[in-house]
Image: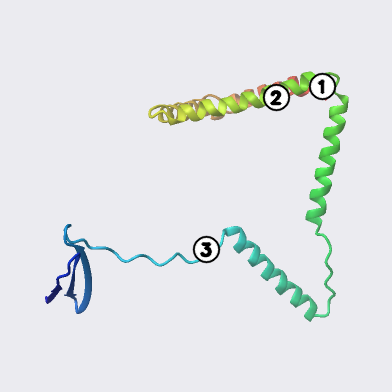
Amino acid sequence: MASITSPSSSSSSSSTLVDGKTTRQLATAASSQCVTLPTLPPPPAVQSRAAKTTAYCRKIARNVAALATSTGEVVTAEATTAETSTTEISSELVQKIQEAWEKVDDKYAVSSLGVAAFVLLWSSTGVISAIDRLPLFPGVFELVGIGYTGWFAYKNLIFKPDREALISKIKGYYKDIIGSS
């Protein structure tokens, strides 16, 4: 290996021959010699999955339109049935909700219950995330869940009489909640 050094007042520079290539190293006189790595090039432009899917779908649509026009068929720009069915479903849903809201006698109580349910859900999410951050509890809860799932399957799902009893119990609860109609 050949090494050439040229002293300077503030920093030293050396050129070293490594594997037939000359590398350049700079170091300050006060500190030890440091080796730096070259910077990486910028990452290529990455498209999101949604953008790729949209571009691909547009390409397919253009190809289909080109095939349709080349065979002599007329291509029209109409709303698809999926879009119209979605708007119909959403308008029907809004109408059903409005009708149900008009039938309610005590709107204040229903509104209060809705707000209370939202606050309860929000606070329980906070409690669960706080418990999840504790080091031992998530693993213990997972084991308890696996154990309970196994016990429930053994007790209610393996044997036919137990399954039938569970189904009848669920149907009974359903009739109690919904009412017999």
Q: CA distance from mark 1 to mark 2?
A: 12 Å
Q: What residue is shown at x 54% (from left), y 30% (from top)?
A: 158
Residue at 82% across, 60% down: 79
The correct choice, above or below, for 149 with respect to 90 in the image is above
Query: What residue lies at 87% left-to-right and 25% top-to-bottom?
Result: 103
Residue 135 or residue 32, whichever sits in front: 32
Q: Which residue is mark 1?
A: 107
Q: Which residue is mark 2?
A: 115
Tags 1 and 2 touching, CB below 8 Å: no
Q: Amino acid at mark 2?
A: Val
* Side of 47 where 87 appears, left or right: right
Q: Marks 1 and 3, Cα distance to the nearest angstrom?
A: 51 Å
| Element at label 2 | helix
Q: Position of residue 165 (x, y in %)?
A: 63, 22
- In the rendered image, residue 90, in percent from the top left (x then y), is placed at 80, 44
- Dot 3 amino acid type: Val
Q: Is residue 103 above or below residue 62?
A: above
Under mark 1, the amino acid is Lys
Does 72 appear above or below 163? below
